[in-house]
Image (cartoon, rainbow, N blue to C red):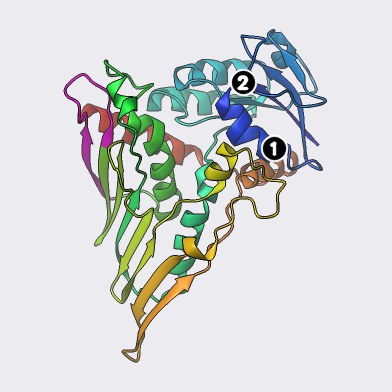
Amino acid sequence: MLTIAYIGNGKSANRYHLPFSTKLKDKINVKTIYSRRAESDWDKLEGVKYTTNIDDVLNDPEIQLVVVSTPSHLHYRYGKMILEHGKNALVEKPFTETAEEAKELFKLAKEKGLLIQCYQNRRFDSDFLTVQKVIESGVLGDILEVEMHYDYFRPEVPENVHEFSKDTSYLYGHGCHTIDQVLSYFGSPDTIHYDVRQLLGKNRMNDYFDLDLYYGIMKVSVKSSYFRLKERPSFVVYGKKGIFVKQTKDRQEEHLKMFYMPDNEDFGIDLPEHYGVLTYVDDDGIYHEEKVVSEIGDYSRVYDRLYETIINGKEKLVKDEETIQQMEILEEGIKNI
């Protein structure tokens, strides 16, 4: 068993972590959850120790992995603290505020023979996995362009933020999802064009971004806005022979917000109306248009891989250099405001 603890007992821990770590009952043992405040809006898990004393986490010899699910400005501090106490660490995204902080943490982990990794659960989004399946089928031919959109219509969010900060930046808060997907699948780009904005005016919240990452002739665009009354498709993939459009996002978050948990067999699974549409011309010049059954997303695969890495010595899911490069991209993007 891999015995773990959490620092933070808010939405991040209870919505995006605990439903998936506790699902792996034969591999993961959640022992302790630390929070500065004893009171919480979330129900307590049976058999888990809740504490306001962080020493109950850091000085417990049974705990092998500590998960940091706090506001992002605390990630570096807690990550370093965990490593210095001889424990492995899983840190929510964005991993740190700067690439230099990320490099320092990876260096410290290496010196101590420990693991520290960013929690990139969106690698196991259904829509992203389905796009990979379509690309690898080869029916689109050479890929020319990929568009990735992460849109909301929540004008009240930027309207209620009156000063710029990395903590509230849309690029830092949400670009860390999609940029990691790009780096994990397509690798390091040749060049990047940045369009990062504050739609409500200078020194206000960063509420829009549009990054173009170039790989030879192929362009991958990552676009997000808080002012999209109608969302753009989650993914559009253009090839020399056709196009694939996945309109809807992975449904795991949708179900979690309804407290419909991963122990349900149909959790996060697309219905036929959510399937993407593949349109292409085959080698005989025949036109095809068909729905593609979505792959099944599952964020518990992050914890399953952590178990294999820490207990069985398998390679890390998220490479250090991928996290460092993502932090460099986020930093450069903010400079371009």
> x%, y% of residue 144?
28, 65
* Percent x, y of residue 74: 49, 16
Residue type at tag 2: Leu
Q: Which residues are magenta?
A: 190-208
- The image position of residue 328, as x and y in percent, is 34, 33
Q: Which mark is residue 249?
A: none
In what element is the residue under mark 1? helix
Q: Is residue 281 above or below residue 251?
A: below
Report the residue at 38% width, 43% height from top.
179
334 lies left or right of 264: left
Q: Is residue 318 visible?
A: no
The label shown at residue 21 is: 1
The quadrant of the picture occupied by the C terminus is top left
Count of marks placed on residues? 2
Query: Height in image: 106 above or below 311?
Result: above
Image quarter (top left, top right, bottom left or bottom right) of the N terminus:
top right
